[in-house]
Image (tube, helix red, strand yellow):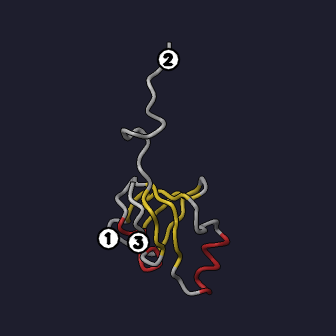
Amino acid sequence: MSAESLPLTALKVGAAATVSEIKLRPEQRGRLLEMGLLVGTSVQLIRFAPLGDPLEIKVRGYHLTLRRQDAEQIWVRPVAPEGVAGCASDSAPTE
């Protein structure tokens, strides 16, 4: 698992991450906070529009569309996918 932050736009489609920093101006940040996009929130990149702008993320059980310019100011820490060797969820089934 990577502990290094990167812009939301750098994630691969389908990747999950945790918001680590929101670098938007206060007047733009407030709108996102009201929609539940806070530092520490889990997000998943769903898709980019055909021309790359906007992009769609899943946050708190709903889909949110963001302009690429805004998404570049949201920094995240990627989360290791479930089922990766070494994770606690990898246990042998019991009979």
Q: Quadrant of residue 29?
A: bottom right
Q: Residues within 10 Å of mark 3 (few under 14, many from 20)?
A: some
Q: Residue at 58% x, 56% y: name it.
A: 62
Q: Residue at 58% x, 68% y: name it.
A: 39
Q: Residues within 10 Å of mark 1 (few under 14, many from 20)?
A: few
Which mark is drawn over residue 18?
Answer: none
Q: On the image, numbered disc 3 is attached to which residue?
A: 7
Which mark is drawn over residue 94?
Answer: 2
What kind of residue is marked 1?
Leu
Q: On the image, numbered disc 1 is attached to which residue?
A: 51
Q: Mark 3 to mark 2: distance in Å?
A: 41 Å
Q: Earlier in the sequence, mark 1 or mark 2?
A: 1
What kind of residue is marked 3?
Pro
* Depth order, front residue of 35/80: 80
Give x and y (percent) for residue 86.
39, 39
Image quadrant in which the N terminus is located: bottom left
- Per the image, label 1 sits on a secondary structure element best described as loop
- Per the image, label 2 sits on a secondary structure element best described as loop
